[in-house]
């Protein structure tokens, strides 16, 4: 496992790849896999946004735990802006659905997985537009 630091751009590229994987898995009927990849798309986009924003947190601690990242994202970027609360809620909801997909004996409902993939695409695009505006016109790979 590599101990390298990710840049906001590298994390957004990971988010784009995870979005594409989520869409492909959904089309194959793998709803749990689609939910997992959709969540990780949001997770990586949130990490990129935190790094790009200059939030007062240690770069090495961003993404060490899921709850830590979600908390930092909410505290630094949602609570007092610039990320709208409804966009911030998407990350929380995705985390809940991913826990069902990965750890529960039941599968995610197909409609929930479809909605989560759409929400991941919205979330990733919103993070790119807000924190990496120079890249927001480059959606060919999302």
Image (tube, rainbow, N blue to C red):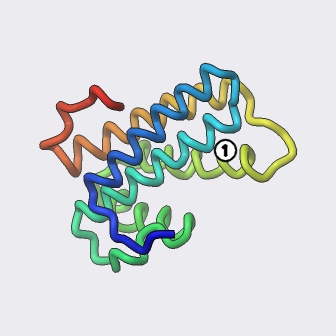
Residue at position x 65%, y 50% from top? 96
Report the front residue among 85 and 65.
65
Residue 13's x, y, as percent? Answer: 33, 45
In the displayed structure image, the side of residue 81 where residue 32 appears, left or right: right
> SS at mark 1?
helix
- Estimate the x, y position of residue 23 in percent, counting from the top left: 52, 27
In this image, 63 relative to 45: left or right? Answer: right
* Image quarter of the C terminus: top left
Most distant residue in the right direction: 105
Q: Residue at x 27, y 44 (%)?
A: 128
In the depicted structure, whether residue 7 falls above or below residue 58: above
> Horizontally, is 96 left or right of 37 in the view?
right
124 over 71 or under it: above or below: above
In the rendered picture of this protein, how many numbered marks are placed on residues? 1
Q: Position of residue 75 (x, y in %)?
A: 40, 67
**In the image, farthest residue toward the left:** 134
17 sits to left or right of 67:
left
Rendered image quadrant of residue 79: bottom left
Q: Determine the image quadrant of residue 51.
A: bottom left
Q: Which residue carries the number 1 mark?
A: 97
């Amino acid at each position: 496992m590599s101990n390298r630091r990710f840049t906001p751009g590298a994390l957004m590229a990971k988010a784009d790849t995870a979005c594409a994987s989520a869409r492909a898995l959904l089309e194959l009927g793998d709803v749990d896999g689609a939910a997992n990849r959709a969540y990780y798309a949001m997770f990586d986009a949130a990490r990129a946004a935190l790094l790009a924003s200059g939030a007062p947190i240690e770069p090495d601690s961003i993404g060490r735990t899921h709850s830590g990242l979600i908390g930092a994202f909410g505290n630094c970027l949602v609570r007092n802006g610039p990320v709208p609360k409804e966009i911030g809620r998407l990350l929380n909801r995705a985390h809940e659905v991913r826990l069902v997909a990965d750890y529960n004996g039941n599968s995610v409902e197909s409609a929930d997985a479809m909605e989560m993939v759409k929400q991941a695409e919205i979330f990733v695009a919103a993070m790119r537009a807000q924190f990496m505006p120079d890249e927001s016109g480059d959606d060919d790979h999302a």
